[in-house]
Image (cartoon, rainbow, N blue to C red):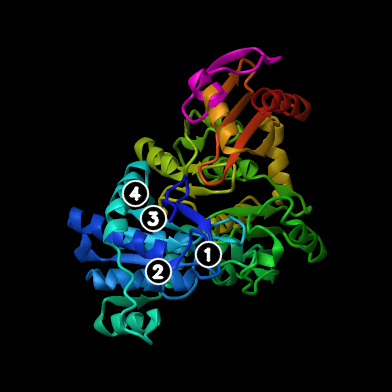
Amino acid sequence: MKTIQFGTGGWRAIIGEEFTRENIQKLALALCMKMKAEGVAGEGIAAGYDRRFLSKEAVIWACEIFSRQGIRVDFISRSSPTPLLMHYVMKHGLHYGFMVTASHNPAIYNGIKIFTYGGRDADETQTADIERWLEKANADYVCDDTEKGRMPTDFYLESVKQGLVREIHPLNDYLDEIIGMIDVEAIRKSDLRVAVDPMYGVSLTALTITLSIARCTIETINAQHDTLFGGKMPAPTAETLRNLSNYVLDKYCDIGVATDGDADRLGVIDDKGRFLHPNEILVMLYYYLLKYKGWHGPAVRNISTTHLLDRVAESFGETCYEVPVGFKYISAEMQRTGAIIGGESSGGLTVKGHIHGKDGIYAAMLLVEMIAVTGRKLSEIAEDIRSQYGTLHMEERDYRFTPEKKIEIQRILMEERKIPSLPVAIDHISWLDGCKVYFADGGWVSARFSGMEPLLRIFCEMENWEDAREICRIFEEFLL
């Protein structure tokens, strides 16, 4: 068995290779050991799952271990959004929750996200501790197949009868909080038409309920259960949302919203059928919170997210803080600084007063509110921001590599700290998370290894696309 290792968004693995019953149960056993050592086993753990292949079965396999260890599981026994589980962990003061999902990864993957007290993503200290407990779990784990003819579901049903597994349905509490934070009356007066694309994932029920309460007309695509996600990655990008773009235009919608496989990330199509980059969404919402809702406070972004957010913050006398990639860093910095919004260029964001993690459903409703309150189309709001703060163009590139090449790149970039000769004046360089070069004119380029996939990621943001592409090309030739 390969060692279970956590990345920036949990543990993910290919189904049937590393994502197996044995590995899932070993991880569950490691969590049991950790909870007992910390004296929190008595409060139990919460669990949920998305629509991926084997997701529900994985929770049942884990429940078998938790039950035998005497730890109660509060199990959201319907496929559900990850933010719902985070909300439950936070509201019930639990120290741990786990969600079976591989988020936006291809259909051949599944995985587990671990959440800690307050409903936060497990940080590096927590995941490293889990990996240490896994060493003991590997040694102690025994696959209990001694009772012939019995299925894992038999143990599960017995655990339910004994009260060691409680099947829960906390969707209403989660939706009530979102509805309470949104200006529902403003939306009701606006007669908005919204196209919803769950991308075959788990957001449909939550989005349709909240939008219906706000009296929106709802059009939906890709709503059925499909573990292959229509043959595409369940990630809301310009490429994967082409059908939604056409649908928005065909149905004369005011906005199209899409969520990734577990509904913690958001993709948006404006009223003209244009895909809005997550950077634009984050900037729009921060601007809306400051100008129209009258909020005050800084913003937080990771190193690969637009510096246009900094310009908005500065114009309102606020600060934008930068952190490494990984939403756990964003939520921690928001708590430290009192920031009112935090997000990343991959489509995840959160707003103060809600959960301490990404929520594509709440973000979608806040965007719908923004259209209603401002009385302006989404394309007009985007143009307003461009006219005030200018335009920055981001080039994003991913590169695969051999294990040998990764060692070489690591040596050049992180140990020797070498960078190529660049045609732009450099202000300073940071090695906070990979390498990020800040230019004197406000542009930047970063190169870092993905925490979830075997990829080198190069991002460059400049005043024009040609410069961004050229700098990416220079980095590519230098490192690859």
Question: Could you give the CA–CA distance between mark 3 and mark 2, rounded to whole angstroms?
Answer: 21 Å
Residue highlighted by disc 2: 173
Q: Of helix, strand and loop, which one carries label 4? A: helix
The range drawn in magenta is: 412-436
Mark 4 surroundings: few (<14), some (14-19) or many (≥20) residues within 10 A: some
Instruction: Give the mark, 4 or 2, whose residue is nearer the N terminus.
Output: 4
Query: Is disc 3 surrounded by few (<14), some (14 to 19) or many (20+) residues within 10 Å?
Result: many
Toward which corner of the image does residue 157 lie, by quadrant?
bottom left
- SS at circle 3: strand
| Residue where numbered disc 4 is placed | 131
Viewer-nearest of discs 1 and 4: 1
Q: CA distance from mark 1 to mark 4?
A: 21 Å
Give the mark, 1 or 2, whose residue is nearer the N terminus: 1
Q: Nearer the viewer, mark 1 or mark 2?
A: 1
Quick one: 158 or 286, which is closer to the camera? 158
Residue tagged 3: 114
Proximity of marks 1 and 2: CB atoms separated by less than 8 Å:
no
CA–CA distance between discs 1 and 2? 36 Å
The type of residue carrying mark 2 is Asp
Mark in the foreground, 4 or 3: 4
Q: Dot 2: what SS?
A: helix
Q: Position of residue 35 (x, y in %)?
A: 24, 57
* Residue 167, image x, y percentages: 36, 77
Residue at 42 percent across and 75 percent down: it is: 77
For the residues marked 4 and 2, what is the alpha-carbon distance in whole angstroms? Answer: 33 Å
Amino acid carrying label 4: it is Glu
**Which is nearer the eye, 80 or 138?**
138
